[in-house]
Image (cartoon, coloured by chain):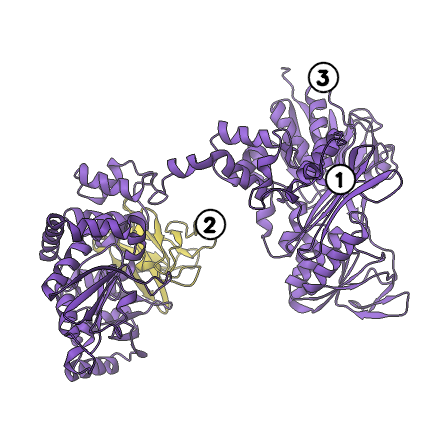
Chain colours: A purple, B yellow
Amino acid sequence: MSNRQEKLVVIGNGMAGVRTVEEILKKDPNKYDVTIFGKEPHPNYNRISLSSVLQGDTGIDDIVLNTYEWYEENNITLYTADPVVDIDTTKQTVTSEKNVTISYDKLIIATGSNPFMLPLPGADKEGVIAFRDIEDCETMINASEKYKRAVVIGGGLLGLEAARGLINLNMETDVIHLEEYLMERQLDDTAGTMLREELESQGMRFHMKKQTEQIVGKDRVEGVHFKDGSKLYADLVVMAVGIKPNIGLAQTAGLETNRAIVVNDYLEASASNVYAVGECAEHNGIAYGLVAPLYEQAKVLADQLCNEKSEASYTGSLMYTQLKVSGVDVFSAGDFQSGEGKKAVRVHDEFEGVYKKVMVKDDKVVGSVLFGDTSDSPRLLDMMKKQEDISGMSKAVLLPSEEADSTESPVLSMAPDETICGCNGVSKEAIVQAIEQDGLSSVEEIKKHTNASRSCGGCKPLVADLLQATLGDESSISQVEPLCGCTSLSHEQVQEDIRNRQLTHPREVMNVLGWENEEGCSKCRPAINYYLGVVHPETYEDDDLSRFVNERMHANIQNDGTYSVVPRMYGGVTNSDQLRKIANVADKYDVPMLKLTGGQRIDMLGVNKEDLPNMWSDLDMPSGHAYGKAIRTVKTCVGEDFCRFGTQDSIGLGIAIEKKFERLNTPHKVKMAVSACPRNCAESGIKDIGIVGVEGAWEMYVGGNGGVDLRPGDLLAKVETSDEVLEIISAFLQYYREDAHYLERTSHWVDRVGLEHVRSTIIDNMDNRKYYAEQMEVALENKPADPWESLTHNENKRKELFERKAVELV
Amino acid sequence: MDTLQGKKEIYILDYKDLRANVPREILIGDQSIAIFLTHDGDVHAIENKCPHKGGPLSQGIVSGEYVFCPLHDWKINVIDGKAQAPDEGCVTTYETVIKDGSVYIMY
């Protein structure tokens, strides 16, 4: 390599220019000292995705393709917001608007194109814009905050995307189109009409065969007048009638231009060492306005610039478009209009809104239009590119999705060399290879490694299908869900290691098990703290710093940072003394709301944290643990004491259960209920443990849930005495405490391990039942005292947790 | 004491009263500020208000230099006040000074 790097200057910081630089860096990262000039004040972004920004799907930051760091890492000098204004092809120098002059050994012109503005009277008024760059996007978004009516001139690809975005921005949007049907350059009349009907049903309004005459208004646009005498009011006019290559600079520099800068098969312009790529280049009479050709050109040019003996040449691109306007898939390629010597295969399903047309000439596919279902597009494109002879093929080969099982992804039937990402020219085998060799496991990674789905994103579903097909079942077997981002170990593995390796302290767990993040996070620390407590009930000292705010403060935090206080009322039974105390406390501390909870107690809401300890002390009632991953309540019905249907003492049993298990930590909250008859007034069917009294017996249901995942409890056992009920609750809860993942409700746990498994473990096997019941006794003996009582007497904790220390301004 | 930036050095609490990973809340007028002692012995002060929905950061779980908001688990760096990806935003940070066992805040 020579000592001196050659100087490469790129005019244009857009998709074509930067892609060429990327291709060069891939081939020979040290060959050139690269400088890029760009007109816009942004790094290279994905212009195709501007419509997603406008449609509200992504933010501007999300569409940046190359971050400023990327330029820095690759030692590229970048001038943004500073377009080149002069090229001297003799001295080989360029000069920018801000007067930067540098010399070049090689020059790439990638100035793209400008939107074509109709030279209408009034086109210079405020509020008349194009749809081409981030600034236009921002103008539209800002306009939508102040104004209501938008008119889009042009019913082509860009115009429709702009119109869709404006509708999403809550503007009334009218689309003006000169032709008889939409997107006439990409669609035939059938597909164009279907598209119009679909978009009309989404609220877009069309005015076809209409020619705009002038734009009226004072300073800002107020309306649009048409040749036929009709008018529309408008506060914003978006012109989307086409683009014209940006060639002013090249013309001044004396380069040969036609519609665009004329280049040969090596992308060379008419001066030596000057090249052009992308929308500003014209090859063989064609200036392309789509992304795939521009990337093909970038590849060829990079090879030319890096390899003196390069044989790469550009021979033109097949034109095709994939468009998605709010859920409508449209694809168009090649020569799709009917005509002499051409025959068509057509599928038109008006029920499903699907239309497919494949044009065949001389036994070869020459063009296609797909509407509503574009899954056959990769296959058709491939046939067109390879000019395959289809004389021996059936319709099923042309349009495989018509025959295939509709649930099967089209990627499965694709040949290895078929293209999946048309924009970036990435084949099926290239993606499969990357997945296998680089061990990729997400679409995002595939995008980074292969560029597939990086541009228009239309092939993302195919890439995802291919990823799944490639990894197969292997992925689901080998991939365990890690406990959190700090480790690759699962809940089970951590539980097992704590047991088998006798780990006793959170820091020890994280150290020994190789936590990536040595301090842990808000997900793993509460889990580890819980697991340690279950494994070492007699010795483990609870780490309250690892507890979620509610369990540390022993109250429920509310959306405004205040707390709620729920005293325990065993079995939902209270008395006048308790009610008086609650009423007095509510008055004393100005409690904004008192509410009855679903667990049959009283919630005092909106309490300031500094008032909590005094309130508890005044209440002199035990904590209801309404905030904890713990035993919550035992809801009861009235039962035999008063109810004329009651067959059992539900209140008595409920209170006994609550007194026995209160303050016990569990993987997640545990709600219980006892009903005295199958009318089930205590809703035992949707509780973690629900007891239902029947004549002479108790039925025990487990795994019920009345919350997010509504699930009826499963009948676990039917027993005769309340002692048996207590023993089985002990065994069930202890098994759940030891086996379930932290934050796994009984409903999910029972689903995961299976009711039969639970039954055979603690119901059928008496030894096991005794064992778990005994372990429960140990846990109960070691459970903490009432936290409200102990916190009110702990000065340090009161300061640390509940104080809001007012500081004096001196 | 006035400084060049026009900020005042205000005494907030004794250094010995701080425990690592136990945030404290102080009030300067109506302004609530969360104080953190990290394991390296430094004291950091940030606005006690998560950029998301205003959750009191002084009541979150602290791991190293991060505090997790008690309302929706946003992860905020207590040193520079920045929310961690995928969330975005930041809270005001305040400089602190430790002198003779006392902690001061520049306010």
The answer to whether the residues at label 1 and label 3 have Cβ atoms under 8 Å apart is: no
Asked whether A138 or A572 is in front, the reply is A572
Q: Which residue is mark 1?
A: A111
The answer to whether marks 2 and 3 sit on the same chain is: no
Name the side, left or right, on which A775 lies relative to A752: left
Quadrant of the image for the C terminus of chain B? bottom left
- Chain bearing tag 3 is A
Label 3: state its secondary structure. Answer: loop
Q: Amino acid at mark 2?
A: Pro
Q: Which residue is mark 2?
A: B86
Image coordinates for residue A627, horizontal then vertical, percent: 26, 64
Image coordinates for residue A154, horizontal then vertical, percent: 80, 56
Name the side, left or right, on which A176 lies relative to B55: right
- Chain bearing tag 1 is A
Q: Which residue is mark 3?
A: A308
The reply to whether residue B99 is visible in this rendering is: no
Cα–Cα gap, marks 2 and 1: 34 Å
